[in-house]
Image (tube, helix red, strand yellow):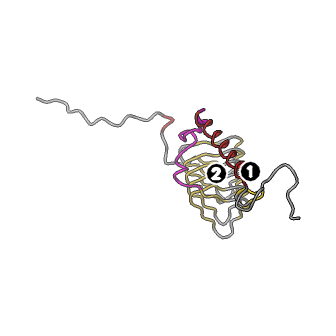
Amino acid sequence: MFSRSKAPSAAPAEPEGERISGVPSIVSPDLKVTGNLMSRGDIQVDGHVEGDVEAANLTIGESGAVHGKVSAKTVRLCGSVHGEIHGGTVTLAASARMMGDIVHESLAIEAGAHLEGHCRRRDPEQAALSPATAVPATPAPAASVKAIAASKKTKTALEERSTEKGGPNGPGTAGGFEQITGSEPKRPG
């Protein structure tokens, strides 16, 4: 008659290492980190990092400096980076000092920002394929290699026959171009 109704089951709890908090990890201005920083969440760097930084969203404050590779979906640079930036949306504020290359999907540079390096836009579809999910290059099967070698031999044989009979411009030419051999080039005489 009176039975306990089962409450809807909650989603299974994520393991401790899988949770992403809404609070960014902060490297304060008086902190110097030697080593790489990796987070699935947000990182704000106001101190100095000697190493690579990888995060979902990364903000480098005016007093912040990173010497290494920076990778994040969103990068906002107000301080300095000596290295590469790989990001989806990259913003260089007026106070930014960038020494290195930027690979981005979207780039904004405010007036006054300092940039020494190259900027290259990457295709968002290629960015979705990480090296782990990308299809590895496989060597061509032996049959394909033999077919390529056979086509090269055929091409060479056709070129030899063309030069024996003479191209459209007479003997010694193939397809209108001078035949190149190991000897001195022919000079008009």
Relative image position of residue 140 (x, y in whole percent): 60, 36
Q: Is residue 104 above or below residue 17?
A: below
Is 2 or 162 nearer to us in this picture? 162
Q: CA distance from mark 2 to mark 1?
A: 72 Å
Which residue shows up at 55% across the image and 52% down it? 73
Count neighbours of disc 1 (C-alpha within 10 A) and say few if under 14, some if 14 to 19, many if 20 or more.
some
Q: Which residue is mark 2?
A: 45
Residue 134 is one of the magenta-drawn residues: yes
Is 15 or 47 nearer to us in this picture? 15
Q: Is residue 71 above or below residue 97?
A: above
Q: Which is the main secondary structure of the residues drawn in magenta?
A: loop
Q: Which residue is mark 1?
A: 164
Relative image position of residue 27 (x, y in whole percent): 64, 48
* Pointer 2 with pointer 1, Cβ within 8 A: no
Count neighbours of disc 2 (C-alpha within 10 A) and say few if under 14, some if 14 to 19, many if 20 or more.
many
Q: Which mark is residue 117?
A: none
Query: Furthest residue to the bottom?
Result: 111
Q: Is residue 24 above or below residue 144?
A: below
Instruction: Give the mark nearest the N terminus, 2 or 1.
Output: 2
* Range shown magenta: 122-142
Q: Residue 118's image quarter?
A: bottom right
Mark 2 or 1: the one toward you: 1
Question: Which image quarter is the C terminus in?
Answer: bottom right
Question: Which image quarter is the N terminus in?
Answer: top left
Residue 54 is one of the magenta-drawn residues: no
Relative image position of residue 119 (x, y in whole percent): 66, 59
134 displayed left or right of 178: left
- Circle 2 SS class: strand
Residue type, numbered disc 1: Glu
